[in-house]
Structure formats: structure tokens, C-alpha cells
Image (cartoon, rainbow, N blue to C red):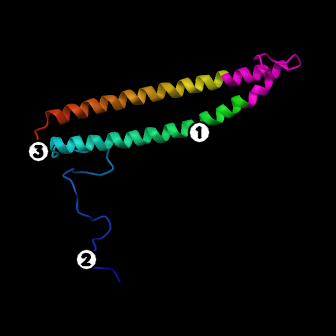
Amino acid sequence: MSDPTKPKPGTRQKIGPIEGNPVTTHPNLDKLSAYQRGLREALLREFKARKVKKFVEKQVQYINANRQVAEGIKILFDEHGQPPANAPMEDIIAERRQLEYQIKWFEAMAEELRTRLLRVREIETLALDVLERSPKD
């Protein structure tokens, strides 16, 4: 039997004054106080920061894997960093191409992280401006 004191699924009481579909990316924020808007922005910043953190953690796994690859290619070179006299030229060229590709990949990843950091800083600045202009509660 169902408990009559429990609300039906999808009919919980709202905890904030935001109207509309909760899935929307552009809710109507007119009914929120400046303080509530600041809290909302802080929550969004935290969410995005965690998202970036997970992305970076995933990329670090790739970096660790690439470091292991780099350790593996040390066998292609002697103690002076020169290839041995009998090393196949094709292997050296293939390894150079792979390293160039990895460098381009790391540069692209770093540029994406810089772009995301700039966006987060802009949001942070806007949120701090809103909080500074809000009346003290």
C-alpha cells in the first residue's frame, strides 16, 4: 500500500521562486533576490569547476600514459641521446611523427583549458559584481 502522507512523484514542493521547466538553460531569474542570484552563480561556478577538474583528471591519465611511452622510447637512444648506429630510420621517423602529434594534442588541450579558465573568470567577475551591488541582508 502507498503512504498517503508521501507526495506523488513529480509533485514535490518548490524550494525557490524560479518558474518554468527546471531543465531549461535560461530560467526566469526576475523573482530572485540579488543574494539568491549570487548563490546561484556560485553554485554554477562550483559545478563548472568540478566539471573542469574531472576533465583535467582524465587528461592527466593520458599524460601519464604518454610519459610511459616516452620512457619506452628511451631504448631507441644511447646515454648521449644519439640513436644507435643500427637503428632503423623508419622507426625513428615514425617516433618523431608520433611525438609531434602528441605535442600538438597537448597544445590544443592547453588552449581549451585556457579558454575555459577565461570563461570561468568572466563569470566569477560578474558574480562578484552582483554580490557587491546587492543590499546587505
Of badges 1 and 2, nearer the viewer stands 1
- Indicate the secondary structure of the residue bearing disc 1: helix
Query: How many C-alpha atoms fall within 10 Å of the one at disc 3: few (<14), some, or many (≥20)?
Result: few
For the residues labelled 1 and 3, the Cα–Cα distance comes to: 45 Å
Q: Residue at x 76, y 23 (%)?
A: 94
Q: Are marks 3 and 2 in contact (CB under 8 Å)?
A: no
Query: How many C-alpha atoms fall within 10 Å of the one at disc 2: few (<14), some, or many (≥20)?
Result: few
* Residue that numbered label 3 is attached to: 137
Instruction: Please count the marks in the image.
Output: 3
In the image, residue 27 above or below residue 56:
below
For the residues labelled 1 and 2, the Cα–Cα distance comes to: 49 Å
When asked about the image quadrant of residue 75, the answer is: top right
Per the rendered image, the range of residues in magenta is 72-99
Q: Is residue 120 magenta?
A: no
* Residue that numbered label 2 is attached to: 5
- Indicate the secondary structure of the residue bearing disc 2: loop
* Residue that numbered label 1 is attached to: 61
Q: Amino acid at mark 2?
A: Thr
For the residues labelled 3 and 2, the Cα–Cα distance comes to: 36 Å
Residue 5 image point, x, y percent:
25, 77
First in sequence: mark 1 vs mark 2:
2
When asked about the image quadrant of residue 65, the answer is: top right
First in sequence: mark 3 vs mark 2:
2
Q: Residue at x 19, y 34 (%)?
A: 130
Residue 7 image point, x, y percent:
27, 71
On the picture, is 93 further left or further right than 131? right
Which quadrant of the rendered structure holds the N terminus?
bottom left
Q: Amino acid at mark 3?
A: Asp
